[in-house]
Amino acid sequence: MLSKRAARAFFVGGTAVCSVVFVGLTVDTFRQIPGLTHSSAITPAVAHGKELWDKNNCMGCHTLLGEGGYYAPELTKVFERRGAAFIRAMIKDPEGMYPGQRKMQKYPLTDAEIDDLIAFFQWIGEMDLQGFPPRPSLMPIAVPTSTGSAVAGAANRPQVFNQLCIACHALGGQGGAVGPSLDLVGSRRDATYINKWLHDPMSMKPDAKMPKLPLTEAQIDELTAFLSQLKAPVTP
């Protein structure tokens, strides 16, 4: 059993050692922050995007870096998951992306402001967060689940498909359920129809629920080539 003097010395010594360790870890953390966060990549666009995030209280619904609301999706890695095209379309018209399903309001942001928000999300997503957040395992994106030429072609699907199309459409048993499944879509629609549809769905079908997506000509050509090849295998 320790005497009062020994107990006091043990307490004081332990507190001093722990304090030194705490200060050392704090100093080391601050030393690593610039490299882990890539602070040198903070451009005026990134800084303005952060201001827009705070001004519009996005954290009231969304989580970023582990902080915020849990009402809406976590956005730390949203740029990696969805890409610029999806983010831009979602911010410009949430209801148009998910008719009757999304409760996110449409903010009166200019195209330049949306670009700054995207730049902010890209910078956040490129931080070295030591494995945070973990990759979701509930619904991996676009993994072939059956055999056949349609799914074999899906193994080489364009990046824009995984980021944008899969949010609403299913392929190979995985993806969204907002729009129709794209399995064997090449057997139902030819390349000309698919190309025109991707340019402007409502010009092909006035009551179409799919919005006109912010796709480049190169992305439309890539998607057209990919989707038009998703056909039923030819039996000899």
Image (spheres, helix red, strand yellow):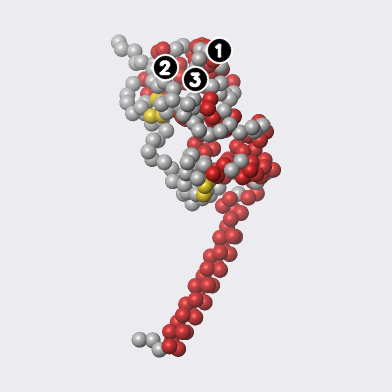
Residue type (three-letter) at the residue carrying disc 1 = Ser
Q: Earlier in the sequence, mark 3 or mark 1?
A: 1
Q: Nearer the viewer, residue 3 or 106?
A: 106
To which residue does mark 3 refer? 209
The label number, if any, that marks residue 185 in the structure image: 2
Which residue is located at x 39 percent, y 17 percent? 184
Q: Residue furthest right?
A: 44
Which corner quadrant holds the N terminus? bottom left
Q: Earlier in the sequence, mark 2 or mark 1?
A: 2
For the residue labelled by badge 1, is the local secondary structure a helix, a strand or a loop? helix
| Above or below 211: residue 17 | below
Which-is-in-front pick, marks 2 and 1? Answer: 1
Which residue is located at x 55 percent, y 44 percent? 59
In this view of the protein, can residue 57 be seen by the observer?
yes
Q: State left or right for residue 231 relative to residue 121.
A: left
For the residue labelled by badge 2, is the local secondary structure a helix, a strand or a loop? helix
Which residue is located at x 34 percent, y 21 percent? 148
The quarter of the picture where residue 176 lies is: top left
State the separation of the CA atoms marked 2 and 3.
Answer: 18 Å
Residue 18 pos. (x, y %): 49, 72
Residue type (three-letter) at the residue carrying disc 2 = Val
Q: Are marks 3 and 1 in contact (CB under 8 Å)?
A: no
To which residue does mark 1 refer? 203
State the separation of the CA atoms marked 3 and 1.
Answer: 12 Å
Label 2 Cα neighbours within 10 Å, binned few <14 / some 14-19 / many ≥20: some
State the separation of the CA atoms marked 2 and 1.
Answer: 19 Å
| Above or below 4: residue 110 | above
Residue type (three-letter) at the residue carrying disc 3 = Lys
Q: Earlier in the sequence, mark 2 or mark 3?
A: 2
Which residue is located at x 52 percent, y 49 percent? 67
